[in-house]
Image (tube, rainbow, N blue to C red):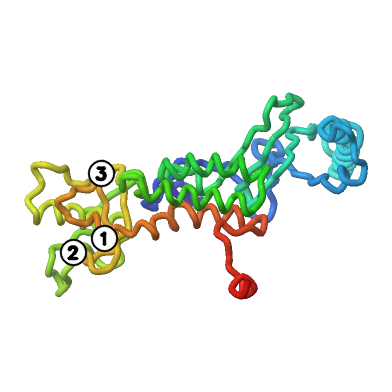
């Protein structure tokens, strides 16, 4: 949804279904005033250089004390100066150590993975993986991929690049053995009626108008096949509001399309099993979301052969 800032708010449906809701923010500065209260996000500070230089016996205890005795007093003085400069009635700004993490991977603003050792002074028996805004774990990613991502991200905190690549290859073999229903992209569907056209209208041979979104196009083609093959008594039509799945098809398939949608099961009557592009599905559902994370640390999801490897 998009809210337009006018005297009377209006709501525009963008046709996108998302499960995540993010907090408000302003351009160029995460701090803003709401109801006369300064609202702001946390600040992350990397202290690996301090740990390397001081070499404490207990890095976690050291960081707790460092935050309390060194950082917090400096921040408090800064807020006091801000109070004086702005002639504020009272300073209500306070910052304290929130989380201590052993490893942090930041893909972009509000997209990160942290290996949290403690939070609010509570030390975990085992580090807790905290993820936010990561495309790989959204509901629009197949469940088998989300499960593997969570496993892989834990390994990412403690293993090498080559070990991650080996795990990716192991999962590829597992992925290819799964039924197509588990590989497919899950998606929410709004309305498809506005994209439908009669076959042959305006000289076109497809049952949808030009510019139809992929998930709607895949759903319309599914309904078209159900109707033309007389399968409507066995399978339900896809309609607006349904939760669908869609897959990629290789060229030369009977539909002439590169995608097809379905509800719970791809009808075998379509005869599309041998045309399913499993390699492209693996790339789109797993490799590309994973590489977005690995790029942040300069790693590759798959080994890259060099010229030296060729001659060795």
**Alpha-carbon neighbours of circle 1 within 10 Å: few (<14), some, or many (≥20)?**
some
In-image side of 3 versus 223 (left or right): right
How far is mark 3 from mark 1, CA to CA?
19 Å
Identify the mark nearer the N-term, 2 or 1.
Answer: 2
**Alpha-carbon neighbours of circle 2 within 10 Å: few (<14), some, or many (≥20)?**
few
Q: Are marks 2 and 1 in contact (CB under 8 Å)?
A: yes
Q: Is residue 205 above or below residue 122?
A: below
How far is mark 2 from mark 3, CA to CA?
20 Å
Q: Looking at the picture, tell me which residue is in the foreground, 9 or 300.
A: 300
In-image side of 178 versus 210 (left or right): right
The residue beneath circle 3 is 263
Q: Are marks 3 and 1 in contact (CB under 8 Å)?
A: no
The residue beneath circle 1 is 275
Q: Is residue 303 visible?
A: yes
The residue beneath circle 2 is 254
- Residue 71 — which label? none
Residue extending furthest toward the front: 312
Residue drawn at (42%, 41%), measured in percent from left and top?
143
Q: Is residue 83 visible?
A: no
Residue 45 percent coordinates (x, y):
79, 45
Secondary structure of residue under mark 3: loop
Residue 140 percent coordinates (x, y):
42, 46
How far is mark 2 from mark 1, CA to CA?
9 Å
Identify the mark nearer the N-term, 2 or 3.
Answer: 2
Q: Looking at the picture, tell me which residue is in the foreground, 163 or 270.
A: 163
Secondary structure of residue under mark 2: loop
């Amino acid at each position: 949804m998009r809210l337009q800032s006018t005297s009377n708010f209006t709501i525009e449906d963008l046709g996108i279904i998302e499960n995540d809701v993010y907090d408000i923010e302003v351009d160029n500065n995460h701090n803003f005033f709401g109801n006369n209260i300064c609202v702001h996000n946390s600040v992350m500070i990397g202290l690996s250089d301090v740990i390397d230089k001081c070499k404490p016996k207990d890095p976690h205890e050291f960081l707790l004390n460092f935050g309390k005795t060194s950082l917090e007093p400096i921040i408090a003085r800064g807020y006091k100066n801000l109070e004086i400069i702005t002639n504020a009635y009272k300073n209500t700004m306070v910052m304290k150590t929130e989380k201590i993490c052993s490893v942090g991977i930041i893909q972009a603003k509000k997209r990160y993975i942290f290996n949290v050792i403690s939070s609010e002074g509570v030390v975990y028996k085992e580090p807790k993986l905290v993820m936010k805004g990561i495309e790989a774990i959204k509901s629009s990613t197949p469940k088998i991929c989300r499960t593997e991502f969570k496993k892989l991200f834990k390994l990412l905190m403690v293993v090498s690049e080559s070990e991650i690549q080996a795990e990716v290859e192991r999962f590829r073999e597992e992925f290819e053995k799964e039924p197509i229903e588990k590989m497919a992209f899950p998606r929410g569907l709004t309305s498809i009626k506005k994209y439908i056209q009669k076959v042959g209208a305006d000289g076109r041979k497809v049952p949808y108008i030009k510019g139809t979104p992929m998930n709607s196009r895949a759903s319309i083609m599914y309904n078209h096949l159900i109707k033309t093959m007389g399968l409507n008594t066995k399978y339900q039509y896809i309609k607006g509001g349904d939760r669908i799945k869609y897959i990629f098809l290789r060229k030369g398939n009977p539909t002439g399309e590169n995608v097809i949608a379905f509800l719970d099961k791809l009808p075998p009557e379509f005869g599309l099993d041998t045309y399913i592009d499993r390699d492209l599905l693996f790339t789109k559902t797993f490799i590309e979301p994973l590489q977005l994370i690995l790029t942040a640390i300069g790693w590759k999801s798959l080994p890259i052969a060099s010229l030296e490897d060729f001659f060795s």
